[in-house]
Amino acid sequence: MPMRHICKLSLYTDSEYTFISPAAVYGLALEELFKTIDHTLCPMGKRCLKNWLYHPLKSKTEILNRQDALTLIKNNPRLQDELNNLLRNFSDIEKSLCRLSSQDAAAKDLLALRNSLERVPEIKAALAGLEQKNSLLSIDDLPEIRTLLIDAINPDVPLSNPEGKIIRPGYNKELDSIRDIQENARQLLKDLQAREINAAASILLKSVIIMCSVIISKLQNQTWIQYRLITSAGKHWLTRNVS
């Protein structure tokens, strides 16, 4: 499979984390611990928590920074409620981005990105005031991409049969005309058939009128000739008999 989606290579090291061997993971029952403390609301949160648990930090500063961020959220019940609502059923955009970069994306991936990025301003608003207190609570926004996806992607796209329905109606006139042909092909063919029948009938009617005009013209000419002949013969007869 081509790897055009890979833009650079970088060396991965786990020097920032304490190494835990598979035997230690089993002995410490980390999997059972993870299942016990896991109250995450989305796949990315679950993955992040598991990564933190299996890769403990070495730096005291980073550990305290992480604990401080969690304390700020823990001590703010209103913020917890807002985040619970915003992060519930939040799409796994990490996997969607991987499929998009690999050119193997489906309609659900575009829809996931659209719906997820649409929530980012609300999450930033909920965290307003805490971003300055802890860098872990600072979230980057992508307004241009978010606006593009909201304007272009149809929020009601059917995931079972999305062909021709991914782009929002009204976003592109040319695409709308093609979609109209796809969705109303039968009616368009009926309309075309009716127009062609009317056009053929009109041509036929014109042809009949022209033929009738020609026939009438010929009949008129023949009648005129016959009239002239009769008139001439009558004059000749009268002249001969009078004389």
Image: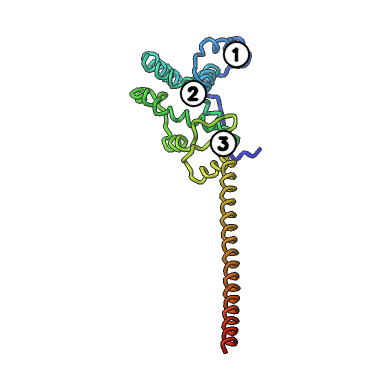
Give the class, few, some or many, for how many residues have Cα within 10 Å of label 3's Cα (few <14, many ≥20): some
Q: Residue furthest front?
A: 242
Q: Position of residue 221 (x, y in %)?
A: 58, 73
Q: Earlier in the sequence, mark 2 or mark 3?
A: 2
**Image depth: mark 2 or mark 3 in front:** 2
Give the class, few, some or many, for how many residues have Cα within 10 Å of label 1's Cα (few <14, many ≥20): few
Q: Residue furthest bottom?
A: 243
Q: Earlier in the sequence, mark 3 or mark 1?
A: 1
* Residue 152: image tag: none
The residue labelled by disc 3 is 101
Q: Position of residue 133 (x, y in %)?
A: 35, 22
In the structure shown, which secondary structural element does the residue marked by tag 1 occupy?
A: helix
Q: Residue furthest left?
A: 129
Q: Position of residue 220 (x, y in %)?
A: 57, 71
The residue labelled by disc 2 is 90
Q: Earlier in the sequence, mark 2 or mark 1?
A: 1
In the structure shown, which secondary structural element does the residue marked by tag 2 occupy?
A: loop
Residue 65 lies left or right of residue 99; in this view the side is left
In the structure shown, which secondary structural element does the residue marked by tag 3 occupy?
A: helix
What amino acid type is highlighted by mark number 1?
Answer: Val
What amino acid type is highlighted by mark number 3?
Answer: Ser
What amino acid type is highlighted by mark number 2?
Answer: Phe
* Residue 25: image tag: 1
Q: Residue at x 59, y 51 (%)?
A: 197
Above or below, 138 relative to 227: above
**Image depth: mark 2 or mark 1 in front:** 2
